[in-house]
Amino acid sequence: MNNKDYLVDVYKDFFETSYVSSDEREISDSTSFDFSNIDTLQIDDESKELLKKIFDYMRTYHNQEEDVYLDFHFIIQSNNQELIQKFEEIVESANREYSYVGQNKGYLSFYEVDTLDKIKTVFQNQFIVIKDLKGFSLRDEAFKKVFFHVLEENIHHKIFIIEGEKEDIDYFFEFDRDLIDQCFPFVFKGQDPDVLDVYQEVLNITHQDSESEFAVKILDYISETYGKEKIDYPSYRDRLCREIVFHHDVPKLESEKTMEEIFEQLNELVGLEKVKKTLHELVDYMSLRDKAKDLKLNNVNLHMVFLGNPGTGKTTVARIIVDILYHLKYIKQNKLIEVTSKDLVAEYVGQTAPKTMEVVERARGGVLFIDEAYALASKDNQNSYNAEAIATLIKAMEDYRDDLVVIFAGYTKEMRDFLDSNSGIVSRIGYTLEFDDYTEDELVAIFDGMVKKAGFVVKEDAYPVLRKIIEDNKDTKNFGNARFIRNVYEKTIVKHASNVKDKKRKDVLRTITKDDISCENLKSFL
């Protein structure tokens, strides 16, 4: 009798009709086994439903509602031992709850088992895990034939779990294609969970509120870093959880990027075509100067001015420039010190110069980014403390020109007024980059990138709602551009979390709809 075919006959409502999720069809169960544990497995929804049906059949057989005993054997395709162990524990728990086979559990590793007697010893157990399939390929033909002969003799009234990667599983079953028809295959989605799965698990472990602003910060961090390091998923998750629990923050991970990765990050930014062109030309010039030592090329003046409204990518580009200059060895440290005029100007006479120099010293070897730099020229203070800060900066730019890069940033009009009022600053600026406001289409693309990077999909009916919010706010004073969209994104994720709090289907959890797009308590950043 084919176990799969019989199970299909028992559950025709599942196997012969359109897919219905467990949210809509309950499995009756008078025992204490928790079927919801199956939903935590990283397999597709139909595989979860199949596993629930298998366990439900164990229950009905245990309660003598079914009198036909079925052998349930499982093939687990994955290379993540933590995921495999989780699957084993759930199957073992169901078996223990329904007393389907005996409780003795044995492991068979082909790196360790090399004789017929060892195989028979393992097969005396009722719950058996066959692992290390790569070792199977190292055995001779005689051993492989004997193994499958013994397996066929012992396969009934037991539970087998055969685990491994796809190529090893395929090779293993080449020696007995009939055996694979007696097993139920379960494929874990990829080697590791995706961004949203990681996010949800981290929230559960650290007991974070999914509707909090800190939860959005965690999601952003995972979106930026997950899969970028040569570290397995459990280690990544545990390190992140430790940082959140003990330090109440996400860790600051650093890794040196290649130039290709740096420019890929730059080119992925929406818009900013003039900025991208300037940076590409700058790097080309610096590379030529380094490669052709015999050419009489001038030293590169890397002090810069960034002109643009809020949220146009000035700080983001500054961080990319740090990566570029560090990669080209024009700065000694991969660091960006971000300050405003308040960090440079003191309250009392004689304190501004030391305060400014303290910031300069922290930035030496890297890049000093002065945001809203035009505030240094504010009329109410221009002949006192602010002027002292500017004079100190000018001297530092000259004295440390080989050990410091300064970027002045701010609104276009105010920054032009600031530069026009101070020839000392202008004479030391090598590059001026203008950051244009984003168009409506670019703002939509930025939103799209944020949600998709986090693993969500957006339904088409959500875009008109998003565009209406942009249209209503784009012409307001000090419109925040990408910062505004970041705010919309965060409000949307929080509202989406609330809208789907009673849902379980993964496709629902991943989908942003028009009802999720939120401008509640929305503020444009100044």
Image: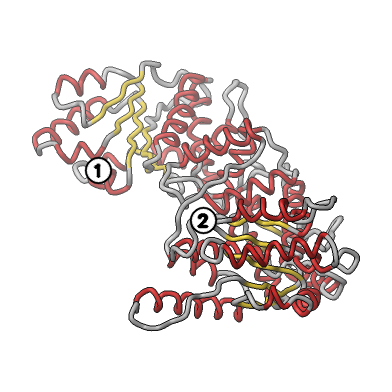
Question: Which residue is pictured at 77% across the width and 72% down the height?
Answer: 411
Residue 210: image quadrant is top right
Residue 445's place in the image compared with 518, above or below, is: below
Viewer-side residue, 222 vs 253: 253
Q: Looking at the picture, how far across and down is residue 43, in whole percent?
A: 49, 44
Q: Which residue is mark 1?
A: 173
Task: Tell me the colour scheme of the image.
Answer: secondary structure
Q: Looking at the picture, how far across and down is residue 502, in whole percent?
A: 72, 42
Question: Which residue is pictured at 46% across the width and 18% down the height?
Answer: 99
Q: Residues within 10 Å of mark 1 (few under 14, many from 20)?
A: few
452 lies left or right of 110? right
Image quarter of the C terminus: bottom right
Q: What residue occupies the far right of the structure in this picture? A: 380
The amino acid beneath tag 2 is Asn
Question: Which residue is pictured at 86% across the width and 55% down the height?
Answer: 521
Q: Which residue is mark 2?
A: 334
Q: What residue occupies the far front of the structure in this picture? A: 350
Residue 520's place in the image compared with 9, above or below, is: below
Viewer-side residue, 429 vs 399: 399
Question: Which residue is pictured at 53% across the width and 51% down the height?
Answer: 225
289 lies left or right of 469? left
Q: Secondary structure at mark 2?
A: loop
The amino acid beneath tag 1 is Phe
The reply to whether residue 320 is visible in this rendering is no
192 lies left or right of 292? right
Q: Looking at the picture, how far across and down is residue 268, in whole percent?
A: 55, 69
The reply to whether residue 193 is visible in this rendering is yes
